[in-house]
Amino acid sequence: MNRMRSVSTGVGPRSTPARRGRRTATGPLWIFDLDNTLHDARDRILPHIDRSMTRYIEEHLGVAREHAEGLRRGYWKRYGATLLGLVRHHAVDPGHFLARTHDLAELEGAVVAHGALAQVLRRLPGRKVVFTNGPAAYARWVLDRLGVLVHLDALYAIEHVALKPKPAASAFRAVLAAERSWCGPRIMVEDTLANLHTARRLGLRTVWISTTAHTPSWVDCRITAITDLMRVWPALVVPRSGSSVPPTSSLRHVRSLR
Ligand SMILES: [Mg+2]
């Protein structure tokens, strides 16, 4: 847990101990995914990282590209992250893999931001943290390019959840344990349904970023872009007595806004 706290203090100026002390235990806790939640990684960043992972597997396992591509996809489906399969079955060094497949120099200029992201994060009340399956150095780099580090309080990356990524419940529990002093509503904002499903099972309120027409009943709110939070957040943070498990009628009008 100390490792996580040391990361949380490094994400931005608002994370100094003095400020953390003043900001404990009131208001909502917002837990944001990174890729395809705070920025659009679909066209450039994620395809680039996929190609880098396939190339890494080719080179370090000495297999043909087609086989490497199959391993990358297969481990991602089986474990939720290609890295886990490579560590478990091929003794790949996690740090080396993450650094080589998230080459920040190669990604320069590839971050696609939502125009009003900084304004949204600045105006939302409460504590705001990022929880990503990517490596910490990559996440910090993206958040810096987005210009939002100053609006965030902590960052949790795959190194900080024992390399067991979302949707593993253990990953969520590690983050929630690090944020245990925060007693307000806890809200996960994500583009990946499987991750939201775990979040919901653990009692978090869930916001799904998607343009899909159908929304599962256990998702509290679906929005098409992070900027839509400015429209729906008041209903998401309404206190509920007796249970940490949503939804209640307080969220019905949020759904009607879809
Ligand atoms: Mg995502």
Image: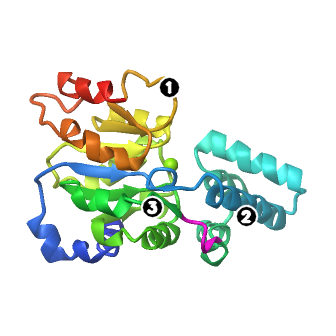
- Disc 2 versus disc 1: distance between alpha carbons? 33 Å
Q: Which residue is mark 1?
A: 213
Residue that carries the numbered disc 3 in the rendered image: 157
Residue kind at label 3, given as amino acid type: Ala
Label 1 sits on what residue type? Answer: Ala
> Residue at position x 49%, y 35% from top?
194
Alpha carbon distance from label 3 to label 1: 30 Å
| Foreground disc of the pair 2, 1 | 1
Residue 75 vs residue 140, the one in the foreground: 140
Q: Which residue is mark 2?
A: 52
**Which image quadrant for residue 19?**
bottom left
The residues bearing labels 2 and 3 have C-alpha atoms spaced at a distance of 19 Å
Q: Main secondary structure of the magenta part?
A: loop
Q: Residues within 10 Å of mark 3 (few under 14, many from 20)?
A: many
Q: Is residue 109 magenta?
A: yes
- Residue in the image at 81% along x and 62% along y: 61
Please name which of the two marks, 3 or 1, marks the residue nearer to the observer.
Answer: 1
Going by the image, does 70 lie left or right of 258?
right
As drawn, 87 above or below 212: below
Q: Which residues make up the magenta segment?
A: 107-111
| 66 is within the stretch colored magenta | no
The furthest residue to the right? 64
Instruction: Name the spot of residue 1 as percent of width and height, x first.
Output: 31, 63
Element at label 3: loop
User: What SS does tag 2 mark?
Assistant: helix
**Residue 252 in the image, given as x and y percentages of width and height:** 25, 23
